[in-house]
Amino acid sequence: MVESLKIEPVGVRKLPLVEALGYVLAEDIVAYENSPRYPTSAMDGYAILGEDQSKGSLKIVEINPAGSDTDGLEVLPGTAIKTFTGALMPKGADTLIPIENVTVDGSTIKIEEPVPTGFAVRPIGENFKRGEVLIPKGSTIDFAEIGVMASLNIVYAPVYQRPKVAILATGSEVLELGECSDNPARIRSSNNYTLEALVIKHGGEPIQLGSVHDERSAIVDALKSALKSADIVVTTGGVSVGDYDFVKDVVRDELGCEVVFKGVRIKPGQHIMLAKRGEKFIVALPGFAYSSTVTFLLYVLPILYRMKGSSYRVPVVSATLKEGFRKRAKGKTEFAVCNLRIEDGEYFCDFEGIRGGSSAIMTNLLGNTGLLWLDESEGDKEAGERVRVVRLD
């Protein structure tokens, strides 16, 4: 459903090179010159004519340090110029014989172990050639991209802006982080902090709005404020069918958003809504911790990635079940937490230590876990069957 939506990157900016780490590149990086521009020494040694090695010994006529101007330096037959790693090859030389392959006697070198003609000489354009696309638009910038751009003297990297994601938990029962209460009916807020961590992990800029009570006016005010500052607004809770589940009505009636879809045939998380206003999105997720986490991975991340100029594919691997699994959601797609391990180079999954119960159990996601993915048409699985598992690492 999300894949079919038109979603554009939120904008482009230029960042100081190292600050661009982790951002998505907004333009192709094209080489404006050859690298190296001239034949260059790849080792410490002596620049010579390759065919001169048959003479047995050569006269040292000059020294050529890295970074020095080679104008006026020329290797003539029977001569050698001591040349260091990274130095331009002198005129006339076609080979670099390493210092380990010769013995030096005063101003003469004796060839102990000849090398092929052209040895240890970096040709023009060995690293890259002028006009070559070195890093395509849409690449995530890592250390290698930083290094290549630095070699091109790119001081500021053109990148897509990171989308701002506002996160709001709803529910009068929600107890804020650090807040004390003697009311046992209230529960500690965790959804919004879990989702904030996921936003950071996946390259978005979170706007943490905390929690708001189940009051229509309070939810309206919070969502209006969130839409002013964020590209994506994510809520948890308030989208089911209860008397106090106001979010779905507020989004449609008070904010004038276009509801793209409401409700999906999955477990957990069937009560989810995606709405759009202009270029901004509101994704209303369920209130239970496990449900909101799973639906965030499935429905919010694809939007976030496209807004930052990239794309997201759910990381799925094929694994072998070590024990049988009874599907609980008949006629729905089900995502069930499992342990995911690699043994002898293959993935295996099991359910040892996984607690059964409601979609509120967040501790099941601790450790090396994944999500067993069973489509609507699939049923129970037997030990030894191959299944799809979403990696969570």
Image (cartoon, rainbow, N blue to C red):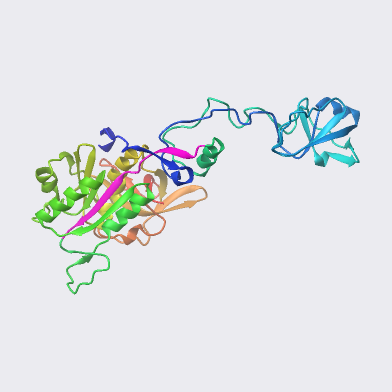
Front residue of this view, candidates 16 and 40: 16
Instruction: Write down the quadrant of residue 182 in the picture.
Output: bottom left
Measuring from the top left, give residue 312's x and y in whole percent.
36, 40
Residue at 46 percent of width and 32 percent of height: 136
Q: Quadrant of the N terminus?
A: top left
* Most frequent secondary structure within the magenta stretch: strand
Report the residue at 74% width, 29% height from top: 71
- Residue 321 placement (x, y as % from top left): 39, 50
Task: Describe residue 111's horizontal placement relative to residue 67 as left or right.
Answer: right
User: Is residue 377 inside the magenta stretch?
Assistant: no
Image position, residue 291 (x, y; %): 25, 53
Q: Is residue 94 visible?
A: yes
Q: Going by the image, does 159 lie left or right of 124?
A: left
Q: Choose between 188 and 203: the one closer to the eye.
A: 203
The magenta region covers 154-171
Count of labels in the image? 0
Give above or below for 212 relative to 334. Answer: below
Residue at the bottom extreme of this rendering: 182
Residue drawn at (31%, 61%) of the image: 355
Quick check: 222 left or right of 372?
A: left
In this image, 106 relative to 101: left or right?
right
Residue 207 image point, x, y percent: 28, 52
Viewer-closest of 314 and 228:
228
Between 332 and 130, the residue placed more toward the observer is 130
Q: Is residue 322 visible?
A: no
Is 162 included in the stretch rendered in magenta?
yes
- Give the answer, above or below, for where 324 lies relative to 29: below
